Image (cartoon, rainbow, N blue to C red):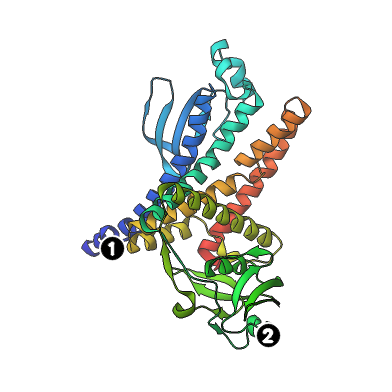
């Protein structure tokens, strides 16, 4: 029994080493997302009946002076804000509930609001996730700066796409597929997600620009948390002598601007990955669900609090992005309905909404099943 308690409650245990870091990361991301919905909804004059972290039976909660029930529930895999007149946590309109509302309640019900207020309230959740990512990046850039290296080629590995394309030590990257590069990290960013795509490289050699063409090949690498990831590489290596690594320091406005830029780059990479994944050009093992996130949270916690906060930023960006996909019941699905409503001048029919919601639920459940399968058996 003592050994069991030690394995469950010790510093390297399942509870302390994995479950608590996982709940810390997920709770912050979910809270920020739902707070975006809540704050903007309240600003728009919409009534809120419940703000929940988690689903299922309520563990603890209280009512505020506005009549909102704030609660923590037993299943901590998400959360929701329920507005006046909603059928459920996905803000589906409830005709029977609407009929029972008093005139005062109808005036603050979500589905009686102008379409722009509803759209603004819905999009606020993902936007707050992006703002959290920007805030974390900005703090890190302001506190630690950013290490950069010059985009130089110190070594060309034999038998690689770069060797076949004619890259030579001493070459300097000018652009990758039309995108100017300033650092070696820029080169890695443009190459890593383009496995199998022919890319045009403009290189500076002996004071002259030359054009080379190479197709990145896949290589399995290990990230800082020990995860096996597959990235595109062309087979060039930088060095301290040629790369001249240095730390760029930022003022607070500069750190904020760089944080916005890096968040934009991360969103672009996420979008490109999803497009390639949809046509079978990315490794399915790169997608994981709660079990993989919990494992990453445990590993990040062992490396230090800074790493755990960086995981919060990465997960927040991912959650925000996924919620903008145009699939009901995700936020993006609601936005599509509001766009159609704005275009035709009237709400989408309940029958059409119900059909689309059913398909959307199946897609979301299928995706959840897929990532759970990946977590347990797939990779």
Residue ranking furthest to the bottom: 158
Mark 2 is surrounded, within 10 Å at the Cα level, by few (under 14), some (14 to 19) or many (20 or more) other residues, namely some
Left or right position of 35 against 198: left
Residue 144 visible at all: yes
Percent x, y of residue 362:
65, 47
Q: For residue 195, what is the image quadrant?
A: bottom right
Tell me how far mark 1 sits from mark 2, CA to CA.
Answer: 53 Å
Percent x, y of residue 269:
60, 59
Looking at the rendered image, the quarter that the N terminus falls into is bottom left
The correct choice, above or below, for 179 with respect to 42 in the image is below
The correct choice, above or below, for 165 with respect to 320 in the image is below
Residue bearing mark 1: 7
Left or right position of 19 against 352: left
The correct choice, above or below, for 96 with respect to 32 in the image is above
Earlier-in-chain disc, 1 versus 2? 1
Mark 1 is surrounded, within 10 Å at the Cα level, by few (under 14), some (14 to 19) or many (20 or more) other residues, namely some
């Amino acid at each position: 029994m003592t050994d069991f308690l030690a394995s469950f409650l010790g510093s390297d245990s399942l509870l302390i080493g994995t479950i608590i870091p996982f709940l810390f990361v997920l709770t912050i991301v979910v809270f920020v997302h739902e707070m975006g919905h809540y704050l903007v909804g309240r600003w728009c004059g919409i009534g809120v009946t419940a703000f929940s972290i988690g689903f299922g039976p309520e563990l603890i909660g209280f009512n505020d002076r506005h009549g909102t029930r704030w609660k923590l529930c037993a299943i901590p895999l998400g959360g929701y804000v329920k507005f006046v007149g909603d059928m459920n946590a996905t803000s589906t309109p409830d005709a029977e509930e609407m009929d029972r509302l008093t005139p005062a309640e109808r005036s603050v019900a979500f589905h009686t609001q102008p379409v722009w207020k509803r759209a603004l309230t819905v999009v606020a959740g993902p936007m707050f996730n992006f703002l959290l990512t920007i805030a974390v990046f900005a703090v890190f850039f302001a506190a630690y700066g950013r290490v950069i290296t010059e985009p130089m080629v110190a070594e060309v590995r034999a038998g690689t796409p770069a060797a076949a394309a004619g890259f030579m030590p001493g070459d300097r990257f000018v652009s990758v597929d039309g995108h100017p590069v300033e650092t070696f990290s820029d080169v890695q960013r443009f190459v890593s997600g383009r496995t199998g795509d022919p890319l045009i490289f403009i290189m500076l050699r002996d004071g002259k620009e030359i054009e080379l063409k190479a197709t990145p090949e896949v290589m399995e690498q290990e990230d800082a948390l020990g995860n096996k990831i597959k990235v595109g590489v062309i087979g060039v290596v930088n060095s301290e002598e040629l790369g001249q690594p240095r730390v760029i320091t930022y003022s607070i406005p500069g750190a904020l601007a760089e944080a916005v830029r890096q968040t934009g780059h991360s969103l672009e990479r996420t979008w490109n990955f999803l497009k390639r994944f949809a046509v079978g050009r990315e490794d399915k093992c790169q997608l994981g669900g709660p079990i993989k996130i919990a494992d990453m949270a445990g590993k990040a916690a062992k490396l230090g609090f800074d790493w755990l906060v960086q995981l919060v930023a990465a997960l927040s960006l991912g959650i925000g992005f996924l919620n903008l996909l145009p699939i009901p019941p995700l936020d993006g699905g609601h936005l599509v309905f509001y766009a159609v409503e704005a275009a035709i001048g009237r709400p989408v029919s309940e029958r059409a909404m119900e059909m689309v919601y059913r398909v959307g639920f199946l897609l979301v459940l299928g995706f959840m099943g897929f990532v759970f399968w990946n977590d347990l058996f797939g990779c």
